[in-house]
Image: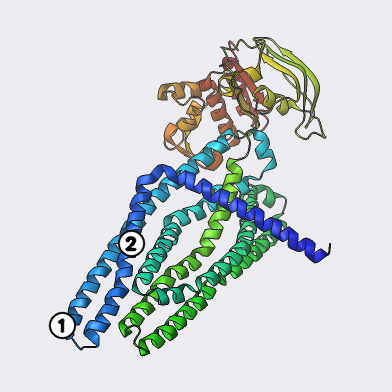
Amino acid sequence: MSFAQQRFEAAAKLDKESAGNRQQVLMRLVRFALPYKRQWLGALLAMVFSAVAIAVGPYLVGYAVDNYVVPGDFWGLMWMLVLLFFVFVLQYIGFRGQFYFVGMAGQEVMATIRDEIFQKIQRLSLSYFDKNDAGDLMSRLVNDVDVLNQFFGQGLTQFVGGIVRMIILGFAMFMLDWRLALATLSVVPMMILVSNYLSRLARRAFRKSRESLGEVSTELEEGISGVKVAQAFNRGEANAERFAELNRRNKEANVGAVAISAAFAPAMEVLNALAITIVAGYGGYMALNGVISVGVVVAFLEFVRRFFFPVQQIAQLWVLVQSALAGAERIYNLLDEPVTLEDTPEARPMPTVQGDVRFEKVIFSYDPKEPVLRGIDLHATPGDTVAIVGPTGAGKSTIINLLNRFYEADEGAITIDGIDVRSVTQDSLRQQIGVVLQDNFLFSGTVADNIRYGRLNATDEEVEAAAKVVGAHDFIMGLPDGYNSALGERGGNLSAGQRQLISFARAVIADPRILILDEATASVDTRTELVIQEALKKLLAGR
């Protein structure tokens, strides 16, 4: 087999797979839309209403030419113009209705998709985030969802409305004169062939474009989050060069996609001109021979214009449609990602923990080729304070992750009070384990909101009491609005020590049975560490 034949067969296989994927994506979008039948029915009725009004116009124009223009009936022509204006008003009402109903349904669908994406991300195991860039995930959440939003908000109305209009106009043309209708539709097979060819090329190009945009988003996210480190190590220029390269690839992918899509509208314009030429020539010939009237020819020329106008609209929307399908495909890839760590059907709630923790011959690896834990045995009894020490990379944080069941041990058993952590629900397990990290994450919101994150139903009095236990109350009251002071992104307007005290207060309010500190005082000053140590004495009482 020649190299050219291999490339042809590979391209054909890719096209077949792409067509299958496209059908699956469309069917899944339809399933998302099905719950909102009333809105879609209202939109469809409005589309049919406006399409019928559009189809009536050419009839009236042809009738006016034969019955009022040729005989010279001025007042008859005036009445016909009034009737045409009324038809235009009906068209406007139909257009207004279809945009309204599709807009309502589209926003419902988008809200459902956003909810499902966010819920999926909350359920995904940490191993997924180890393997996927945050920037690419943000690109799916923001860019891919946004292009779908544009499609549902604008494109779908014109796309489906255009198809409905073409069907009704085609039916109307056959009612007026089947010969000219066939002449008009003779260009449709060519239109379908051109559309299929260009859509295959565009789909590949837009998939590449969305993927490269994910790489750019990743680099942007890292550039913003790590700007302090970049400046400290004088890496700004190197980072800029890397971003410029990724941006160049994204630009080339976008240019390729736009270049393919840009060919669609001119191609439809040429086919439109060809249809007008055929109708004018054939219709004029029949009119000269008395087969049809001049009014019928005029009406058909208007029919051709109105028939191909939605085709041109669809051509202009083709960029959006292909981009939306590519974006939807990436979104569904995320939604289809298997959750590797789920509760078993037999999982039961974890009873109140006493604190007897055992690791028995536990083996674990993030990468199968590089084990992190090799047959670890560990035993802590209730009331014990256990320190796990070792060099960086020895697996200290991994032990914490396994106890919280963020990851599953490859071999061995982890038990609390003799109960295997795999046999209980993850929520009930984690409710009884408090973790304070070296670099705790603070959310956008108030100080009280961040402390209450440990227990969402905590009262204001309980929030304040938790802050007092860890020695955070005084500095919080020194903030402009006290507990209602807004925190910047990741708590950037607080010092490292203040952020850590809030994270300790969060652990206090959660009232865990087991408390884990993962180098929780490594990044704070000596004075703050003394405050934290005093807080720990109170916090560890009874644990």
Where residue 479 appears, as percent x and y from the top left, is 46, 36
Please tell me which residue lies in front, 83 or 178. Answer: 178
Q: In this view, does 377 lie to the left or right of 431?
A: right
Say above or below: 202 vs 408.
below
Q: In this view, does 192 lie to the left or right of 112?
A: right
Please tell me which residue lies in front, 503 or 299. Answer: 299
Q: Find numbered disc 2 in the image and state the secondary structure of the residue it sits on.
A: helix
Identify residue for label 2: 95
- Residue occupying image coordinates x 47% and y 65%: 314
Where residue 87 appears, as percent x and y from the top left, is 25, 69
Q: Find numbered disc 1 in the image and state the secondary structure of the residue it sits on.
A: helix
Say above or below: 525 vs 432.
below
- Residue occupying image coordinates x 20% and y 81%: 77
- Residue occupying image coordinates x 50% and y 53%: 148
- Type of residue at label 2? Phe
Please tell me which residue lies in front, 398 or 486. Answer: 398
- Checking the image for residue 75, the label placed there is 1
Quarter of the image where one finds residue 485: top left
The span from disc 1 to disc 2 (Cα, nearest Å) is 30 Å
